[in-house]
Amino acid sequence: MSTPSTSTQEPPVVISCRGGTPAAQLAEEVARLLAGSGDAEFVDAEAVVRGEYAGRRIAAVDGCSSACGARLLVAKGIQPYVSLSVDDLAKAAEGAPSALATDAAGRIARGVTSRPLRHLKPRRPAMPDAPAWADTDASRGHTVEDYLRAVDTLTAPIAECGALTTDAPTLAAYVSKALGVSRVSAGAMLQRLERLGLVERNASKEVLLTAAGRSEADEAVRRLRLLECFVVSFLGYSVADCREQARTLANSFDLEAIDRVRAALGDPERCPHGWPVDPAVARAESNRLVVLQAVAAGAQVRISRCAEDDPKLLARLAAAGLAPGTPLEVVEADDQRIVVAIVGAVGGGTLELDQATATGVIVEPLALLPR
């Protein structure tokens, strides 16, 4: 890829991935050091997506090989001229932030990268297992709302470093598996949604919500979370079972009925799993959250949310006394397990969780995560 001469252009802008993980913090530190060197300007990725820096060369610095920052730009049709990973830079710069920045600055000035964008294949999250309700829902046929909710979930995956991402493109194959339907059925519905202007596909045939699709998906998610509150508060279902019951009811409640439910519940801010009822709030909040699996030993965190679509995991968490709002200290952590203690619990004691369970617990750091 050829790069125009830097002498006739404004300095490039640099974005970094976002989130509370050590990898994301280091990526931002490297990006800011680049900007501070006078060779580039550090800016918010969302401002770039909005077109505020049209015509400027863009460099993306990511904390891990999921390359969330670069993927966000590419998915929106914005081609960064350099994509750098802290993982890659560290191999040549001994892991020191100042050395990383020096190496990154040199690569940006030369317009080169160890991972050319034409071959950029960031690691996607693993294809999800079909949830327990998928077979039942498939027998009645999926609605537009079902698909919009699925795309909304799949385009907000957990990155390799443990951060929560937003607006990451997904694949039709992932949508089909998430809903428990054939790829042919999923492809046909996605084509319909594309004709309706609710989803769009990038050059790699990956799927993203359009602005109109985002609005419709947000309303579908809001409806479902309010109904989760309803079936727990008024019908007595457990937190582990409330999503399946709410999903059954969701397409039977019109906007007026949902507003009545909201009023009867006292306008709840969060669903029983801890997710904000307002999806816009949930996305904004995600920038400071990580999965428990990514937290290092010695850190203190507070559970913010729990996985919504895994009743067995939710039942295990409930049995262990783990719920949104619970403060935890990570006592031990390795590749196989994580040991936590509930801060302030009478009698002390620790709980051991496997990594799969820890991935379903989304937490807010109470202090900077150890590096």
Image (cartoon, helix red, strand yellow):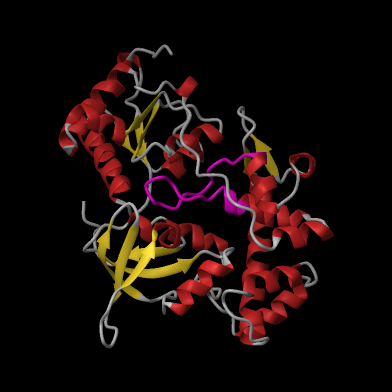
Relative to 232, say whether 159 is above or below.
Answer: above
Task: Please indicate, yes or no, whether residue 275 appears anywhere in the rendered image.
Answer: no
Relative to 111, say whether 200 is above or below.
Answer: below
The image position of residue 201, as x and y in percent, is 65, 35
Q: Quadrant of the N terminus?
A: top left
Name the side, left or right, on which 277 lies relative to 26. right
Queried whether the magenta region covers residue 167, the answer comes back as yes
The image position of residue 301, as x and y in percent, is 31, 67
Q: Residue 34's image quarter? A: top left
261 or 39, nearer to the observer? 261
The image position of residue 97, as x and y in percent, is 19, 38
Q: Residue 86's image quarter? A: top left
Residue for point 24% across, 59% down: 368
188 or 350, nearer to the observer? 350
Residue for point 66% across, 87% down: 234
Q: Residue 48's image quarter? A: top left
Residue for point 78% across, 72% down: 253
The image position of residue 102, as x and y in percent, is 19, 28
How would you classify the magenta stretch by its main secondary structure? loop
Q: Residue furthest right?
A: 140
> Magenta segment, which residues?
152-172
Task: Please indicate, yes or no, whether residue 251 appears anywhere in the rendered image.
Answer: yes
Residue for point 42% across, 20% down: 116
Queried whether the magenta region covers residue 318, the answer comes back as no
Name the side, left or right, on which 322 lies relative to 312. left
Relative to 184, say whether 59 is above or below.
Answer: above
